[in-house]
Image (cartoon, grey):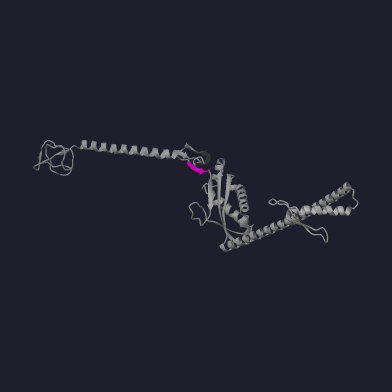
Amino acid sequence: MLPKCPVCGAEIDPDAKFCVKCGSRVRFEEPRKKGGEIRMMEDKGERRRSRWGSVLKATAVTILISIILASVVFSSAMFVNVPVGYGLILVDPVTKSIQGPILGPTWYLKAPWIQGILIYYAVDSLGMWGRGTDPYADYPSVKCFSSDQLEMTVDVMVRWTLDPEKLLDIYRNYPNLNWKDKTIASIVRQTMRFVTANFTAVETVEKREYIAAVMKEEIWRRLQAEATLAGAISYFEFDLRNIGLPSKYTSAIEAKLVAEQEKLQAEFERSRILILANASAQERIIKAEGMAKAKIIIANGTRAAIRMAIEAAGITNSSRIAELYLWVEALKEISPNVNVLIITTGEKGAPIIYQLPTNSTSPHKP
């Protein structure tokens, strides 16, 4: 009869050192008969040593993994990466102190229990337009009223930067870092409603650039005066994107502007016509004055010429000499426009026809 394994009860070969079924290491005592069976006995000491070896290996692996995990956790809690445009504020709950800022880009080593707060101080923006569904808009358009109680929607974009030296002060006032939504957005809305209430709806169209300048100046003044911001805003820009009026009112304003433009055009045309008429009248006056002066000069010249002719000829009949001189001058004046000249010698004399010379004809003798 084969001996049995004391662990699983399977029959095994007496020469074997392990149980084929359960793998237990066994050894046989001196065979002794008890109820006709041969008993065998397990090597308990060797099994105990094997069990303790497995336990020690598992414990060593667990400790090693724990050390690695602890190192990773502690290193992530101790080393802080501060990117460009950020400042690091250190909050120590043990000493109840707040320190900083440490400006990036840099790495900073801190105690594991100290909390590191990153604050962005570079250019930040706040957009208000549309219905607020635009991915680049933080809030919807601001509803405002004009001085004549017309509702309008105003779209704006504001940008600012924070003074790195004031990050600690603004963090003390806003530990949740919500100054953008809690204060800046509120000041922008309130200021826009205050400014638009001082202008009529028509003026918001005609004086848009001026209104934008007033809004920017007033918002900047209020941001500087806000005590909770601690003067941390060092740079500010404001863009008035649009002032939306009801479509019917916009059409009426456009019609009014067109009428005003037409009125200005008509006034300009009237002024132009008056200027041209005045210039034409002045031109005629100047020409008339010139002609009158010319005639006076000619008359004076004629008189002087007649006097000189009389004095040279020694003739006492000055009237006849003047008449002949005037005839000569008249002939000289009409000669360019006359081809044939008819001269009479008296009441009974035959007229003399004289063909005046031209470029194509030769003079005919009478």
In the displayed structure image, the side of residue 329 where residue 122 appears, left or right: left
Q: Nearer the viewer, residue 74 or 139?
A: 139
120 in the magenta segment: yes
- Quadrant placement of the C terminus: bottom right
Residue at image location 88% in from the left, 48% down from the top: 313
The residue under the point 44% across, 40% down is: 77
Q: Compared with residue 278, is residue 174 higher up or lower down, i.e. above or below?
A: above
The magenta region covers: 115-121
Locate residue 302, reporting x and y percent. 83, 51
Magenta region, main secondary structure: strand
Q: Horizontal placement of 342 versus 193: left or right?
A: right
Q: Quadrant of residue 196?
A: bottom right
User: Residue 17 in the image: x percent, y percent?
Assistant: 15, 37
User: Whole-percent x and y of residue 58?
Assistant: 29, 39
| Observer-nearest of 262 and 151 | 262
Q: Quadrant of the N terminus?
A: top left
Q: Is residue 116 magenta?
A: yes
Residue 362 location, x and y as percent?
71, 51
Q: How many marks?
A: 0
Question: Which of 302 and 139 lies nearest the eye of the viewer?
Answer: 302
Q: Residue at x 78, y 54 (%)?
A: 331
